[in-house]
Image (cartoon, helix red, strand yellow):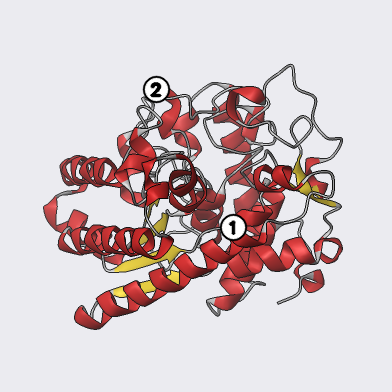
Amino acid sequence: MEKLMWVRLVTIFLVLFGRVSNIAIAQNTNAAFPAVFAFGDSIFDTGNNNNLLTASKCNFPPYGKDFYGGRATGRFGNGRVLSDLITSALGVKDTLPAFLNPALTAQDLPTGVCFASGGSGWDDLTANVQGGVLTMGTQLRYFEQYITKLRAVVGTEKAADIISKALFIISAGNNDVAFAHSFTIRHLLPFNVYGGQLVGASQNFLKSLYQLGARHVWVLSTLPLGCLPAARSITGPLRLCVDVENILATQFNGWLANGLASLKSSLPDYDLRFVDVYTPMLRLIQNPLAAGFVNVWNGCCGTGTFEMGAACNVFTFQCPSDASYFFWDVAHPSERAYKATIAQLFHAQNYDLTSYNISQTIHPLNVSNLIF
């Protein structure tokens, strides 16, 4: 407890004096993984989009209102996002810094960074139609640059050891299924054909990660896309989940899981896991009161029916208590929703939820009230 208090005090001090990169403080030198690397979309992005030529960014209030110091860091939420919380729960460090953060320091590198970019997906078109959003291929190239930087800090042998023992987490497919297949030329493709292309892209990406030394990878499913407030807005005042969108997400998740299993069978030393976040999130949405949520159909920001990005700003009113809302804006869960999801995710991976790092990460959530 004294160690955690010290970390918190130092974190607050650094935030107040503007050194944002240094909030990524290692909590446990005995963590199961020495580092975490995140790739994908806004579920993981911790600020890479801030200086990109894209409208897909949120480095302004009220985003970050519950982050350390109440600062908007480019995270798509009110506080820490899922990549931060996974990193924290594993005891690596409290937050995962963005690789493109100009304030990133050499001491941040050995314990991992984030390459994810809000709006990205397995399909390059998904990112490209949104301006400067980083494609998955570009994120991979930034990882190659990272390796060079890491070698300069710790040496070639130690760098290879860190990468081989690190955990790589990927969240992609949400924007492909919910956006690209509906609002770009990809809508001309039958969904099974498009889904097959996405799975093929994921396998190629994962092969490239393997060639670069990765050996432990968690690939997340999509969210229950039909239950996002943005999707519910098309159903009228009842704001029901859009079943067809959830069906598409479920189909894609099944194909993705099979694609990963096929790739793993050809690379037996590749600890490659499909991690289901669709089911635990849907369970929470369908049983909100058990986890302390009173609203699962609107975002906390504004009316909660369309506000996201620039439409969620300092002139937009917020709900009285974002902790009681599952969604922060119309496309992104709140920090508390992520914490509830983390509890279920780690339970499914056979982690002890009472362990120090996990319990501190999901605090003050009462896991005994969750339905597993």
Mark with earlier residue (2, 1): 2
The C terminus: image quadrant:
bottom right
Residue 367: x %, y % from top left: 75, 69
Name the residue: 24% across, 65% down: 164
Residue 329: x %, y % from top left: 68, 38
343 relative to 332, above or below: below
The N terminus: image quadrant:
bottom right
Look at mark 1 in the image and give the residue it sits on: 245
Camera sees residue 104: yes
215 sits to left or right of 233: left
Tell which residue pokes out farthest to the front in this image.
Answer: 188
232 or 25, nearer to the observer? 232
2 or 1: mark nearer the eye = 1
Q: Secondary structure at mark 2?
A: helix
Camera sees residue 358: no
227 relative to 273, above or below: above
Tally the marks. Answer: 2
147 or 187, nearer to the observer? 187
Residue 251: x %, y % from top left: 49, 69
Name the residue: 25% across, 83% down: 265
Q: Residues within 10 Å of mark 1 (few under 14, many from 20)?
A: some
Residue type, mark 2 in image: Asn
Q: Secondary structure at mark 1?
A: helix
Look at mark 2 in the image and give the residue it sits on: 51
Residue 216: x %, y % from top left: 33, 68
Q: Are marks 2 and 1 in contact (CB under 8 Å)?
A: no
309 or 368, nearer to the observer? 309
Q: For residue 105, what is the image quadrant?
A: top left
Name the residue: 84% across, 40% down: 321
Residue type, mark 1 in image: Glu
197 sits to left or right of 292: left
